[in-house]
Amino acid sequence: MEKKFRVLLFYKYQTIDDVESFVAEHLAFCKSIGLKGRVLVGTEGINGTVSGTIDQTNQYKDFVHSLAGFEDLWFKEDEADTYAHKKMFVRPREEIVALNLDDDINPLELTGKYLNPTEFRDAITSDDTIVLDTRNDYEYDLGHFKGAIRPDIRNFRELPQWVRDNKEQFMDKKVVVYCTGGVRCEKFSGWMIREGFSDVAQLHGGIDTYGKDPDVRGDLWEGKMYVFDERIAVDINHVNPTIVGKDWYDGTPCERYVNCANPECNEQILASPENEAKYVRGCSAECRRHPRNRYVAENNLSTQEWESRLNAIGESLSVSDIA
Ligand SMILES: [Zn+2]
């Protein structure tokens, strides 16, 4: 049965002269129809994900397509059972994806070759091609293309330095890059060309488009795709799905993300409900005995119960960091 909600993922690099009034009008429209989500607006364009009923998302698409320069904006759509966001934000930003280059790249002037899903599949199975995931480490760890390189970065703005440090891996090869919906690769592939990489291509429309393509149907994708909304993980491979996520505590297959219960840490980790309880959702011994551990508070654990759970894994509340 067709679901009643839609999630839209979209971006467009297109010069916006008056960001402030664009933001105000955009937010007013979204609120007037009851849409939810997050849209970033900069002089370089817009980047967003929103959710709502079929009617709300149709109204939003018509609205965006009525804006000068955005008539052909490409919306990627998912069906959903409910909203994928809690609130509606439209925010001004220096960049619609933060790469923080000293000398910014305009993808309208410099960007990598676009590959459609079939071309991308051919490219990533070819021996002389390097596949680079441009997303963050925790996104990669939930799912990625078979054989893709995992940059050791927590944030997109760290990627240029990482590539410079690991240059020897790519310099004389063809490079293909991919990301969730394509917006990061537009800029990043342009940067790689400027850095001197001669043959750089990008997956047009991102993993999202690849998973929906009727010919490739997500083939060669392993695990799930991380998304920055309430759903967290979505299916991509409809040919032979696998699980690559691993439980933080015992390494068993897992696709359930939780945030470390230490509010000062908040590290995103994969954990089963059993291990979450066993380890009071702390990513380290220090986080497990942190005085403001949120798992302990949420579950009203007595100090005695907290201590006995830590004892069961060979730890204690009373351990001093100095000892
Ligand atoms: Zn932690």
Image (cartoon, grey):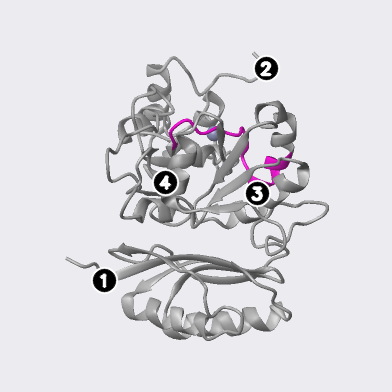
Q: Amino acid at mark 2?
A: Ile
Mark 1 vs 2, N-terminal side: 1
Q: Main secondary structure of the magenta part?
A: loop
Q: Residues under labels 3 and 1: Cα distance?
A: 37 Å
Q: On the image, numbered disc 4 is attached to which residue?
A: 225
Camera-side residue of 258 and 231? 231
Q: On the image, numbered disc 3 is attached to which residue?
A: 189
Q: Quadrant of the C terminus?
A: top right
Q: Residues under labels 1 and 4: Cα distance?
A: 22 Å
Q: Residues under labels 4 and 3: Cα distance?
A: 21 Å
Q: Residues under labels 3 and 2: Cα distance?
A: 47 Å
Q: Which numbered mark, 3 or 2, is in the foreground of this view?
A: 3
Q: Is mark 3 within 8 Å of ligand 1?
A: no
Name the secondary structure under disc 2: loop
Task: Tell whether label 2 touches label 1 (CB within 8 Å).
Answer: no
Q: On the image, numbered disc 1 is attached to which residue?
A: 4
Q: Amino acid at mark 4?
A: Met
Q: Amino acid at mark 3?
A: Ser
The image shows residue 5, relative to residue 175, as above or below, that is below
Q: Residue at x 55, y 70 (%)?
A: 89
Mark 1 vs 4, N-terminal side: 1
Q: Is residue 242 left or right of residue 57?
A: left
Q: Residues within 10 Å of mark 2 (few under 14, many from 20)?
A: few
Ligand 1 located in image quadrant: top right
Mark 3 vs 1, N-terminal side: 1
Q: On the image, numbered disc 2 is attached to which residue?
A: 322
Name the secondary structure under disc 4: strand
Q: Is mark 4 within 8 Å of ligand 1?
A: no
Name the secondary structure under disc 1: loop
